[in-house]
């Protein structure tokens, strides 16, 4: 199969391409000719860049030469070292500038003995201490509650039994003491058995701070007692 | 990861670190003082005063990696203070009004040195410190950035801008013997 004939100007094109390559390679470039310059009126960017680089190099050499000739008086550094050594004893220099780049910070105050004892304890120690403080009865109650909450199908009557246990336990733990300075006797859930859910809710809110209950516990109309007053007060 | 040369090494306390920085960059500190003061002994005094002052205020240095620039600025202020004293030292400016520039040869004359230092000192401080450090210690852009605790790009921009200002100064061009 023969190649199709070249177009009439193809040879010229190839010749131009070859010439362009030679010009860019610098073989056929006449003095002062820049192939990137399309017309004589355009700035000669190549020549400008060359001039700029040569000038920058001259400046760098000149500045290097001047700064290089700048030498301190003989023994100046030794004299400075002596002055520093003498001055160190009077200078308040921090010793804790770290390699991390952090600025020196004010030291934390030393912990007191009590703080030290507290923070030295491990988590297990703290947990066992808390456990021993808990009333065994409350622990059993806690376990019963836990079982009831986890059970998806509670045993028939489990809730009633739990409620009875809770009422009994609460009564036992919070029996009022005969002390005039003591705060009013706390509420007992048993006192509210049979009360309406709204009343129970208000009773439950009695342990909250005033700020929190102010807007949520309105007085009962027609009653002189606040709704969250103890039943036996 | 290696510790940057201007930060304390693990085995260095503050004193060893500070003294090493001063030793390593003494010529930079001296050149910084010499930008303001012409007589070598005055520049030496300024360095000593500035370094001792910096030593007492080391706890005020918030960025240890920027200690070189911080020291340079304190030394320059000390040099200005010396120049302002009643029986003050000769400043680099005075020679410009009185002395003819010496011919440029291989070794620059004192006037040429003083003129260049004076012109560098007229640059904004951030540009002057980069150019001084670059030509006194012969550092690359990356090294400059590391010594001054700035980014390489910031070092490059400061150097370029300072350089352009110097090149626009015809008197300096003539003093350095560079063709216009």
Image: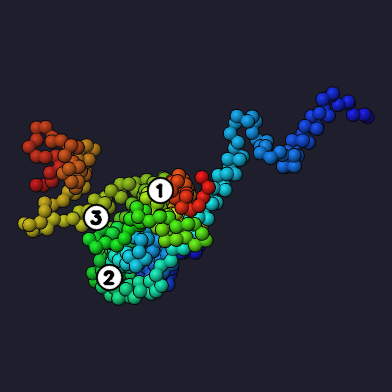
Residue A4 to residue A185: above or below: above
Front residue of B175 and A192: B175
Q: Secondary structure at mark 1?
A: loop
Label 1 CA crowd tier, 10 Å (few <14, some 14–19, many 20+) = few
Residue drawn at x 30%, y 46% as measured from the top left: A160
Question: For residue A47, which quarter of the picture?
Answer: top right
Coordinates of residue A130 in the picture (x, y in percent): 29, 63
Mark 1 or mark 3: whose residue is earlier in sequence: 1
* Chain at tag 1: A
Residue position marked by numbered label 3 in the rendering: A169
Coordinates of residue B40 in the picture (x, y in percent): 37, 66
Which of label 2 and label 1 is nearer to you?
Answer: 2
Q: Secondary structure at mark 3?
A: helix
Residue drawn at x 19%, y 37% as measured from the top left: A216
Mark 2 or mark 3: whose residue is earlier in sequence: 2
Q: Can residue A4 be seen in this snapshot?
A: yes
Residue position marked by numbered label 1 in the rendering: A151
Q: Can residue A196 be seen in this snapshot?
A: no
Front residue of A108 and B149: B149
**Does the residue at mark 2 contact the one at mark 1 (Cβ under 8 Å)?**
no
């Amino acid at each position: 199969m023969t190649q199709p004939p070249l177009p009439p100007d193809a040879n010229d094109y190839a010749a131009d391409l070859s010439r362009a390559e030679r010009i860019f390679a610098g073989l056929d470039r006449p003095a002062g000719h820049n192939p990137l310059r399309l017309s004589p009126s355009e700035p000669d960017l190549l020549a400008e860049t060359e001039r700029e680089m040569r000038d920058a190099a001259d400046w760098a050499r000149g500045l290097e030469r001047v700064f290089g000739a700048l030498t301190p008086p003989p023994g100046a550094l030794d004299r400075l070292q002596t002055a520093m050594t003498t001055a160190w004893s009077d200078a308040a220099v921090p010793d804790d500038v770290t390699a991390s780049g952090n600025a020196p910070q004010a030291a934390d105050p030393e912990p007191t003995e009590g703080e030290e004892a507290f923070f030295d304890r491990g988590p297990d120690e703290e947990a066992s201490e808390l456990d021993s403080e808990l009333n065994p009865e409350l622990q059993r109650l806690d376990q019963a509650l836990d079982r009831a909450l986890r059970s998806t199908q509670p045993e028939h009557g489990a809730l009633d039994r739990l409620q009875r246990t809770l009422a009994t336990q609460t009564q036992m733990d919070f029996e009022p003491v005969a002390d005039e300075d003591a705060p009013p006797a706390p509420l007992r859930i048993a006192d509210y058995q049979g009360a309406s859910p709204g009343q129970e809710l208000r009773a439950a809110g009695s342990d909250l701070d005033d700020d929190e209950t102010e807007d949520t516990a309105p007085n009962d109309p027609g009653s002189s007692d606040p709704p969250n007053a103890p039943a036996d007060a | 990861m290696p510790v940057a040369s201007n930060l304390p090494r693990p085995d260095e306390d503050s004193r060893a670190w500070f003294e090493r920085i001063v030793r390593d960059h003494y010529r930079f500190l001296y050149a910084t003082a010499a930008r303001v003061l012409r007589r070598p002994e005055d520049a030496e005094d300024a360095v000593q005063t500035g370094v001792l002052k910096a030593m007492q205020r080391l706890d005020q240095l918030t960025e240890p990696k920027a200690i070189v620039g911080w020291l340079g600025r304190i030394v320059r202020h000390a040099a200005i203070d010396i120049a302002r004293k009643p029986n003050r030292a000769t400043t680099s400016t005075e020679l410009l009004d009185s002395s003819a520039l010496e011919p440029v040869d291989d070794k620059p004359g004192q006037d040429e040195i003083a003129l260049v230092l004076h012109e560098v000192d007229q640059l904004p401080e951030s540009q002057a410190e980069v150019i001084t450090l670059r030509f006194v210690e012969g550092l690359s852009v990356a090294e400059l950035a590391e010594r001054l605790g700035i980014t390489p790009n910031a070092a490059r921009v400061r150097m370029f801008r300072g350089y352009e200002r110097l090149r626009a100064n015809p008197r300096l061009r003539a003093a350095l013997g560079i063709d216009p």
